[in-house]
Image (cartoon, coloured by chain):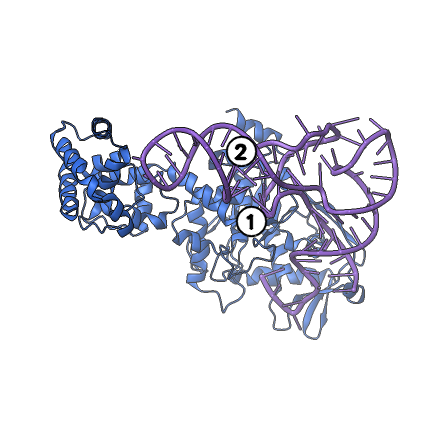
Amino acid sequence: MCCFEEARRLSSAPMSVRVRFAPSPTGYLHIGGARTALFNWLYARHTGGKFVLRIEDTDEERNTPEAINVILEGLRWLGLDWDEGPAVNDPKGESIGEYGPYYQSQRADTYSRRVDELKAKGLVYEDEGALRFKMQREPITIPDLICGDVVRELTDREEVQPDFVIVRSDGKPVFHLVNVVDDIEMRITHVIRGEDHLSNTSKHIALFRAFGVEPPKFAHIPLILNSDGSKMSKRDDGASLEGWQKAGYVPGAVTNYLSLLGWSPKDDSQLLPMKEIIERFDLPQVNRANARFDLEKLQWMNYEHLRALPIDQYTELAIKAGVDFGGASAGYIEAALATCQGKVKQVEDLPEFCSFYFTDEIVYDQAMASKAFAPENKEPFIQLRAKYGDIGTFAPETLESTLKALADELELKVRNLVMPARCACTGVKVGPSLYDLMAVLGRDRVLSRFDKALAQMD
RNA sequence: GGCCCGUUCGUCUAUCGGCUAGGACACAGCCCUCUCAAGGCUGAGAGAGGGGUUCGAUUCCCCUACGGGCUACCA
């Protein structure tokens, strides 16, 4: 009741904000696009406004149900739910909201009606079969919530021909026209988009005015670049959201990371739950400089979110990552995974990391085994086995105190008992805490693995 | 070429003219420790360059350089 309402009260937004994300179904969701969607969504949620999803599927070749699904599923995965927009990945299908259809391929009538309107006003003329809009010759000031007032002078080409095409000679309306028309029809109040659209905004403002409509507020956000500063394109690492979905990243980590690219909570906060980002997000805190994509920081952030995940969600990720549970019980699986959760940086590494829990075919790492199973470790290890056969409860604390007491008694370093035990149980050097892992495995498995290892030590 | 935006540690960023320039990732060292992590401590590391304005500029203005965007009957 404090922060959220305070934030809303202080927000620069007027009542009933309506923002939109308008991607084109190219077959993948670009990370920059995902961030644009996120900022729009955050602004809507922060102000209590509406987030509209509009699909700009004017390129019929690429307009496939699969390509549309990539966008819808990507947004759903990120948790960016839309208040209005498509309900299904079929342009002719159902939609949510009263300003649909939300697929541009279904809005041809609207566009031609709007073109007629401009014609009636005498603001359009034909040129080689195409229709040109009579653009004003004076510079246009673009009031931008992030960049300030930007005065767009005419370029040298525009000095020669300032009028731009709004309908191609094949009858198709161009991006600038449909974009403005849809924003008018859908009552968009704030256009939050990439800075790559800033220069062309003068065209859009002129169009809004031509329709007799007050232009929406504009907020052009900085672009996301590759780590070397070059423009991020389709094939670059991390450019496609799908890659992260498949790699088992935590959606909350991705949105957390993305939110910090170009926006800052202005204090030293790094790890933020979505609820808090919504409360604190606002346009004035967005910076103007482009940001480079830093995979290492994303990975760190993902790890931080990963280890904080409730165990049931963690288990789901483990399943998706392809962990073979070998028919283990749910309780055993959760207990096993809980010991791995704080250790594994990436879900992709989990199947290998936890495999010893779910098979008795332990493959010893040779380097590890030659040290751990050294002849001088055999006698102590036999004694450890005996102790573990006798102790009452097979719990981490007992296992630890028993092992340490024995090491003390034999005047050995703890590692001289730990190493053979770890190698016997897991076969490898790295893994969960030895005592935790033995407790999960249980006495029977541990003792039989000890015996197998002892057989190797002759 | 023209137009527009930008420029603080390698990266993301904090600084509403007073800075011994703070934090995070990554990196290095130490501590802790059953491995790996985590955690703690420490270290190295920055306001593109040049002019102004000012008692004082990272912060304001101009120029240059560099980066990015736009300049289509692409979106």
* Chain in blue on the image: A
Secondary element at tag 1: helix
The residue lying toward the viewer, choosing from B69 and A204, is: B69
The residue lying toward the viewer, choosing from A254 and A383, is: A383
Q: For this view, does A334 lie left or right of residue A64?
A: left
Residue A332 location in percent, x, y? 21, 39
Residue A269 circle label: 2
| Number of numbered discs overlaid on the protein picture | 2
The residue lying toward the viewer, choosing from A171 and A302, is: A302
Chain letter of mark 1 equals A
* Chain in purple on the image: B
Near mark 1 (Cα within 10 A), the count class, few <14, some 14-19 or many ≥20, is many
Image quadrant in which you'd find residue A329: top left
Residue A142 location in percent, x, y? 72, 49
C-alpha span from label 1 to label 2: 21 Å
Q: Residue at x 17, y 31 (%)?
A: A394
The residue lying toward the viewer, choosing from A145 and A104, is: A145
Quick check: A281 above or below A162?
Answer: above
- Which residue position holds label 1? A36
Q: For this view, does B47 lie left or right of residue A452?
A: right
- Would residue A372 be seen by someone viewing this image from the given angle? yes
